[in-house]
Amino acid sequence: MTLLSAGQDVAKMVIFSVYVVNKAGGLIYQYDNYVPRAEAEKTFSYPLDLVLKHHDEKVIVSFGQRDGIRVGHAVLSINGVDVMGKSTAEGKDILEYLKDPANYPVSIRFGRARLSSNEKLMLASMFHSLFAIGSQLSPEVGSSGIEMLETDVFKLHCFQTLTGIKFIVLADPRQSGIDALLRKIYEIYSDFALKNPFYSLEMPIRCELFDQNLKGALEIAEKAGNFGAGS
Amino acid sequence: MTVHNLYIFDRNGSCLYYSEWNRRKQAGISKDEEFKLMFGMLFSIRSFVSKMSPLDMKDGFLSFQTSKYRLHYYETPSGLKFVMNTDLSVPNARETLQHIYSNLYVEYIVKNPLCVPAHSLDSELFSSRLDAFIRALPYFSPRAA
């Protein structure tokens, strides 16, 4: 039995994000409901005991995990100023900057890198293909694609409609009621995107009413999930 | 309740072992291609999951399910991948896969000086013990022919 200290809240079950993928595999809508920012800021003196490397236009930790700084975390800011990709805000290359002892002591903030829109597009298309391969490699006849993918920190739920649109929700593994939420999002899509005369099929969804109703549905699902499961 | 099939891959992608018990549909491609596709799919899922994950992960990708089957995944720190397809009634086969690794693979393959798991596992003892273990699982029941 754990005793909670004053001010510490019980782990809330959340829905992290929603993606909508069209039948060609392109991302047409994306919404981040809850983005946990696990960041660590520390002051370092020369020489830096972490090994950093370039990866995908970012500088990430490749070795030297400690104190909340994990392998794969990206450099988010140096001395309080956010970095721009591989260079500091002033345009100097980060790895060169950190090799120069004159710049120390330096305060660096590390954390999981936020996904850029391009990366989200690529991941959505990647999932579209994985969904199909899951169906092809099935040992049973008549299987659908991947409907639920589970990891230790999140569960991905996918609902494919008869027209080939996929609604994808990333949520806490203990969150319940996601199937009902996926059907509700499909309903909201048909009410506020399809019935919108200015919306073209398979194109990115830019309908305000769709956004508003989606946020409302997510709030209801989160509350219902938290209430139903208890602890 | 049943186990459909089991794959064991090494860290380079070669399929070391495959056996099936209750598979009702073949993939429509040759076995070699199927192994490559399975490994490729798992590699992509792991990469997808590590990018998509909102928090830092400890165990990573565990399983996925479709409307008809569930795929369970276990990877050892040495890069050995155990993949088992079961039907939907099996919620978590991670302990089963861990047991297969520590009590069957390590005992009969790693500790066997004649067994070099380069391309496939040739040990008769391993195959028979693994088959007996799977058939003895509480959730395994052979289909009536």
Image (tube, rainbow, N blue to C red):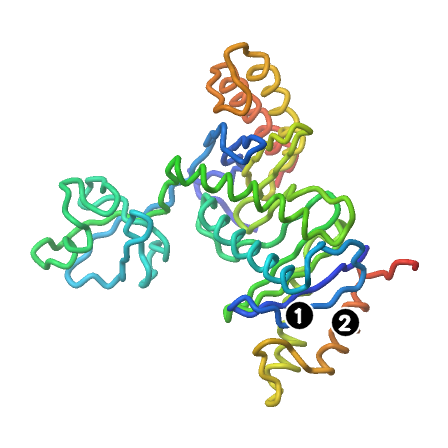
Looking at the image, residue A110 sits to the left or right of residue B21; the answer is: left
Alpha carbon distance from label 1 to label 2 = 10 Å
Residue extending farthest to the bottom is B113
Amino acid type indicated by mark 1: His
Q: Secondary structure at mark 2?
A: helix
Looking at the image, residue B45 sits to the left or right of residue B97; the answer is: left
Percent across and percent down for residue A178 are 63, 34
Percent across and percent down for residue A136 are 68, 49
Q: Residues within 10 Å of mark 2 (few under 14, many from 20)?
A: some
Residue extending farthest to the left is A102
Looking at the image, residue B21 sits to the left or right of residue A82; the answer is: right
- Check contact, mark 1 vs mark 2: CB within 8 A: yes
Q: Earlier in the sequence, mark 1 or mark 2?
A: 1
Residue on which the image places disc 2: B133
Give above or below for B39 relative to A38: below
Give above or below for A30 relative to A190: below
Q: Are marks 1 and 2 in one subunit? A: yes
Q: Residues within 10 Å of mark 1 (few under 14, many from 20)?
A: some
Residue on which the image places disc 1: B99
Residue at x 77%, y 72% (from the top left corner)? B131
Residue at x 49%, y 20% (from the top left corner)? A211
Percent across and percent down for residue A35 are 43, 37
Looking at the image, residue A89 sits to the left or right of residue A165; the answer is: left
Q: Secondary structure at mark 1?
A: helix
Residue extending farthest to the top is A197
Question: On what subunit does the disc labeled 1 rest?
Answer: B
Quadrant where the C terminus of chain B is found in the figure: bottom right
